[in-house]
Image: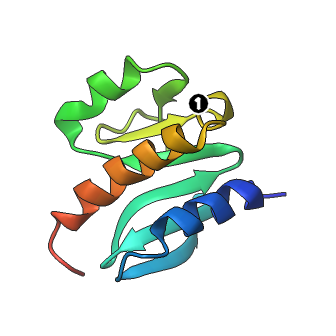
Amino acid sequence: MAFDEVLAARVRTLLAKRSGITEKQMFGGIGFLLNGNMCCGVHKKELIVRLAAGRTDDALAEPHVRVIDLTGRAMKGWVLVRPEGLNDDRALANWVRVGAEFASKLPEK
């Protein structure tokens, strides 16, 4: 299993009512793009969330959140949320909302 299909389905459900959502295989997982900009994704069993770079430290202070370093170095504006932080549907919805709100402010690609 390259990525958690159940988690991806949960994210799909949360994004289903938004227009401009597409999916793309990336990072060895799946990315969800809003108007061409990635807002969140699933990497293995973790949720990738894109957010304002200035919010990275606040997000990292949350339980079950860690820095994303898929390229070998930490990336500001991106975090990974461990499965323990996604068991609750409300928590997952919050993280997906954070990513979607950020991506919605970016110019359409």
Would residue 3 be visible to someone looking at this image? Answer: no
State left or right for residue 76 relative to residue 4. left
Q: Residue at x 51, y 41 (%)?
A: 90
Residue 72 drawn at (x, y percent): 50, 37
Q: Residue furthest right?
A: 1
Residue 29, image x, y percentages: 65, 60
Q: Residues within 10 Å of mark 1 (few under 14, many from 20)?
A: some
- Residue 4 vertical position relative to residue 58 in the rendered view, above or below: below
Disc 1 marks which residue? 85
**Which amino acid type is marked by label 1?**
Gly
In the rendered image, residue 78, in percent from the top left (x then y), is placed at 37, 42
Horizontal relation, residue 105 to residue 84: left or right: left
Answer with left or right where residue 90 lies relative to residue 105.
Answer: right
Instruction: Assign a secondary structure to mark 1.
Output: helix
Residue 73: image quadrant is top left
Give residue 85's quadrant in the image.
Answer: top right
- 109 left or right, relative to 1: left
Q: Position of residue 6 (x, y in %)?
A: 75, 57
* Residue plotted at (27% across, 62% down): 103
The residue that appears at 61% across and 37% down in the rendered structure is 88
Count of number-bearing discs: 1
- Note whether residue 27 is visible: yes
Q: Which quadrant: the C terminus?
A: bottom left
Relative height, residue 28 to residue 80 (above, below): below
Up-down relation of residue 108 to residue 66 (above or below): below
Observer-nearest residue: 19 or 27?
Answer: 19
